[in-house]
Image (cartoon, rainbow, N blue to C red):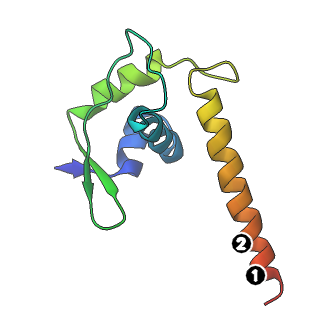
């Protein structure tokens, strides 16, 4: 059986956004990965929207990654997360501005 982002995120104890951000950071070749970092398990991308699906065996590896990853404003992914949050904030603001006059 395959599991969706929401199902896997619930099993691991993180949000779906966190899980997606982990994979986007992990798959970004411009991001330096520290030694000793546990690998994220492979997932299958399906459909034109790149929906990710995982096998149940991925859950322990994701929990290990969650327990390993440094958190907070001094965490490993802080710069990547800031860039992502700024981008989504700008997109949301642009969308609200565009629809305000309608």
* SS category of the residue bearing label 2: helix
**Residue 101 drawn at (x, y percent):** 83, 87
State the separation of the CA atoms marked 1 and 2. Answer: 6 Å
Residue in the foreground of this view, choosing between 93 and 4? 93
- Furthest toward the bottom, the residue is 102
Where residue 19 sits, quadrant-wise, is top left
Question: Can you say which quadrant of the picture contains the C terminus?
Answer: bottom right
Task: Identify the residue shown where x is 52% and y is 39%.
Answer: 18
In the image, residue 55 sits, relative to residue 26, either above or below, namely below
Q: Residue furthest front?
A: 30
Q: Which mark is residue 39?
A: none
Q: Which residue is mark 2?
A: 95
For the residues labelled 1 and 2, say whether their Cβ atoms are less than 8 Å apart.
Answer: yes
Q: How many marks?
A: 2
| Residue at x 45% of width, y 41% of height | 24
Residue projecting furthest to the top: 36
| Looking at the image, residue 79 lies above or below residue 102 | above
Tag on residue 99?
1
| Residue 17 placement, left or right of 72 | left
Above or below, 89 relative to 62: below
- Tag 1: Cα neighbours inside 10 Å, few (<14), some, or many (≥20)? few
The quarter of the displayed image where residue 47 is located: bottom left
Residue 27 occupies quadrant: top left
- Left or right of residue 30: residue 56: left
Q: Position of residue 64 (x, y in %)?
A: 36, 19
Secondary element at image label 1 = helix
Residue 60's spot in the image, x, y percent? 29, 25
Q: Nearer the viewer, residue 12 or 41?
A: 41
């Amino acid at each position: 059986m395959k599991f969706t982002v929401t199902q896997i995120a619930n099993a691991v104890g993180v949000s779906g956004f966190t899980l997606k951000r982990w994979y986007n950071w992990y798959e970004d070749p411009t991001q330096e990965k520290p030694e000793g970092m546990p690998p994220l398990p492979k997932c299958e991308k399906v459909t034109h929207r790149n929906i990710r699906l995982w096998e149940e065996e991925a859950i322990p590896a994701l929990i290990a990654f969650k327990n390993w990853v440094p958190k907070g404003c001094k965490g490993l992914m802080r710069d990547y997360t800031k860039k992502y949050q700024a981008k989504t904030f700008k997109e949301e603001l642009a969308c609200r501005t565009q629809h305000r006059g309608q």
